[in-house]
Image (tube, rainbow, N blue to C red):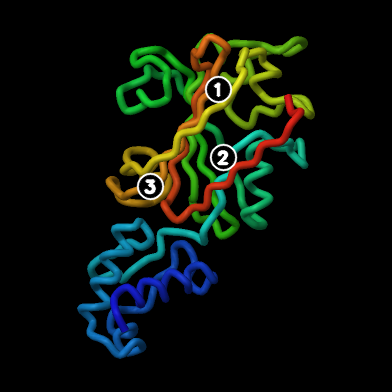
Amino acid sequence: MTQAEIIKDLIAAIDRGDYKYGERLPSTRDLAKKYKITQQTVASAFAVMAGMGMVEVRRGSGVTVTTGRPTRIKLGTFLSANREVATGTTAWARENGNGAKEGPTEVNQILVTEADADTGIPVGEEVVERIRTRSDGDGAPCQHKRTLVTVEAATLIPEGWKGLPPMMRAGDVVPPEGMSIAKWLGMGVVRVTYDMSVAMAAGPAAEALTIPEGTPALRIVSRGLREDGSVAFATVTTAPLRSTVSLEIREGIA
């Protein structure tokens, strides 16, 4: 059995749920015996999987699964079937099994750096940063999401609202049924664009996904654009490469 075949077999076992997030894989010796190959070949397979962010190899502690089953990243404009949670969260959770959840949301005020220049928000501008992590039904972290909202947009208050502006508060922001958050707050967003690329996971994103810094990961940047082309908000999603990205667009949604 080749190294590639071993990796394929182990990934299939993880996808089936035979080995879940946080659990240990069989030892190098046991797998070598099972597949009738050398321990060196198994160790090489583990090294490749570690480079993919799927396992963590610790000398003396074995090999631990650091990924969950493949999950779906849902992009586009859609209505929530359950208004008790934010629209995007509901649409995502419906396709990722019972127990899939998001949060809690952390809110900070920061300055945009060169690392986020691709958001379209000028470097050095002050923004409100909203951070949350999504986990699948087995508790495996599968998406790290950062939404950067310009101060102008973040301080908007909808009619009848009392207290701190919605985007300045921690937790889910839930607009009235049938209305997007941007429309509800009057951000003036006329379109949303998406850019997808492969980048090295770093900092809080790598930590949240429990993968080593430098592990290749999906980087999805969505931007809410006004008529003049300026960015009201941008969301940066970091996710494992094995995630599935889907796009859904429905007409007539605010």
Mark earlier in primary sequence (3, 1): 3
- From the viewer's side, name the closer residue of 30 and 51: 51
As rendered, which of 201 and 119 lies closer to the eye? 119
Disc 1 crowd rating (10 Å Cα; few below 14, some 14-19, many 20+) is many
Residue at point 49%, 37% (across, down)? 145
Nearer the observer: mark 1 or 2; the answer is 1
For disc 2, the neighbor class at 10 Å (few under 14, some 14 to 19, many from 20) is some
The quarter of the rendered structure image containing the N terminus is bottom left
Q: Residue at x 29, y 79 (%)?
A: 2
Q: Residue furthest front?
A: 251
Residue on which the image places disc 2 = 103
Gap between marks 1 and 2 measured at Cα? 22 Å
Quadrant in which residue 180 is drawn: top right
Q: Secondary structure at mark 2?
A: loop
What distance separates the C-alpha of mark 3 from that of mark 1?
Answer: 23 Å
Q: Which disc, if any, is residue 217?
A: 3
Left or right, residue 134 beside residue 124: right
Looking at the image, residue 168 sits to the left or right of residue 49; the answer is right
Q: Amino acid at mark 2?
A: Gly
Relative to residue 141, is residue 25 depicted above or below?
below
Q: Position of residue 100 (x, y in %)?
A: 61, 52
Residue type beneath disc 1: Gly
Asked if the residue at tag 2 contacts the one at tag 1, i.e. Cβ–Cβ closer than 8 Å, the answer is no
Taking the spot 49% from the left edge, 60% from the top edge, the residue there is: 68
Q: Secondary structure at mark 3?
A: strand
Looking at the rendered structure, the kind of residue marked 3 is Ala
